[in-house]
């Protein structure tokens, strides 16, 4: 599942440079898709706690999370709370729902250090953490009140005199992506992160597998990704 968010980035940004980098200089062999004995307690505990806390999108919204992209080819729609780029056990940076609003997966994160020093916490094999490069996400309000999601490199904001770390609706307008600030539903900076992903529902392929055969993407998922 190391590349799940690469699909999101390709759909939102079509910028290969912004895709997560699953390579890790500290890793010599890919870890198994199933949790090890040391990892299982955290995975089990997180699954139970997060299903109680964020089992519905209403609960997620009340906790400050919001949807920021379309369904990807794994069947996941990601919700984010930028307050938790440095996650604790019950406050992940992202949670995923399927098109029916079922909580299906999670991202934990912490700020990027360097490729040789992935996080070592919660009993998780360090090689499971991958690099997620910094960029900007935004959404535009369409005439029918739906949201159109998009993204761009930090450099697109700096070119118009903005600060990616505190991106504004006015910055999005200056880049030419929006006609007015009123059209910008939200804009936020995605920090440079170490990221960890796993499924919060049973997965025959393993909690850390890229896809879950029991999650069927809808026929209308974004971008054909």
Image (spheres, helix red, strand yellow):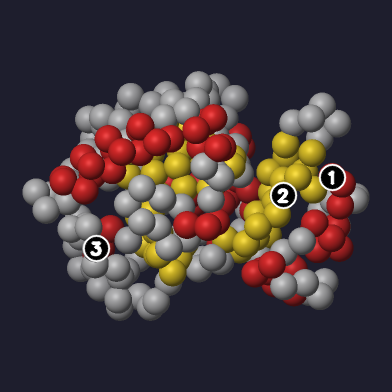
Q: Which residue is mark 3?
A: 121
Q: Which residue is mark 2?
A: 186
Q: Which label is found at residue 183?
A: 1
Q: Nearer the viewer, residue 93 or 29?
A: 93
Answer whether labels 2 and 3 touch (C-beta < 8 Å). no
**Farthest front residue in view:** 62
**Farthest left residue in view:** 37
Q: Does the image show residue 209?
A: no
List x then y, in percent, for residue 157: 74, 68
User: Whole-Å distance between the Cαs marked 1 and 3?
Assistant: 41 Å
Q: Residue at x 38, y 26 (%)?
A: 215
Q: In this rendering, is residue 91 above or below 146?
A: below
Q: Nearer the viewer, residue 179 or 92?
A: 92
User: Whole-Å distance between the Cαs marked 2 and 1?
Assistant: 9 Å
Q: Nearer the viewer, residue 77 or 63?
A: 63
Please tell me whether mark 3 sits on a helix, a strand or a loop.
loop
List x then y, in percent, for residue 65: 55, 44
Q: Quadrant of residue 64?
A: top right
Q: Mark 2 or 3 closer to N-term?
A: 3
How packed is label 3: few (under 14 Cα within 10 Å), some, or many (20 or more)?
A: few
Q: Quadrant of residue 131?
A: bottom left
List x then y, in percent, for residue 169: 80, 56
Residue 90 lies left or right of residue 120; in this view the side is: right
Q: Residue at x 47, y 28 (%)?
A: 56
How packed is label 2: few (under 14 Cα within 10 Å), some, or many (20 or more)?
A: many
Q: Residue at x 50, y 21 (%)?
A: 100
Residue 153 lies left or right of residue 141; in this view the side is: left
Residue 106 lies left or right of residue 183; in this view the side is: left
Answer whether labels 1 and 3 touch (C-beta < 8 Å). no
How packed is label 1: few (under 14 Cα within 10 Å), some, or many (20 or more)?
A: some
């Amino acid at each position: 599942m190391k590349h799940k968010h690469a699909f999101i980035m390709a759909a939102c940004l079509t910028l290969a440079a912004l895709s997560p980098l699953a390579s890790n200089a500290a890793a010599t062999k890919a870890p198994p898709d199933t949790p090890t004995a040391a990892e299982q307690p955290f995975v089990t505990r997180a699954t139970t706690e997060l299903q109680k806390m964020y089992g519905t999108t209403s609960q997620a919204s009340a906790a400050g999370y919001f949807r920021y992209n379309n369904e990807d080819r794994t069947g996941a729609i990601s919700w984010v709370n930028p307050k938790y780029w440095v996650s604790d056990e019950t406050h992940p940076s992202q949670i995923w729902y399927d098109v029916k609003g079922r909580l299906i997966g999670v991202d934990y994160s912490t700020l990027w250090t360097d490729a040789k020093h992935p996080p070592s916490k919660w009993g998780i094999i360090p090689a499971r953490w991958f690099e997620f490069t910094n960029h900007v996400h935004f959404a535009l309000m369409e005439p029918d009140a739906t949201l159109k999601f998009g993204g761009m490199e930090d450099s697109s904001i700096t070119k118009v005199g903005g600060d990616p770390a505190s991106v504004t609706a006015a910055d999005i307008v200056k880049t030419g992506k929006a006609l007015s600030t009123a059209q910008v539903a939200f804009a936020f900076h995605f920090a440079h992160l170490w990221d960890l992903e796993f499924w919060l529902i049973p997965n025959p392929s393993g909690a850390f597998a890229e896809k879950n055969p029991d999650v069927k993407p809808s026929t209308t998922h974004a971008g054909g990704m």
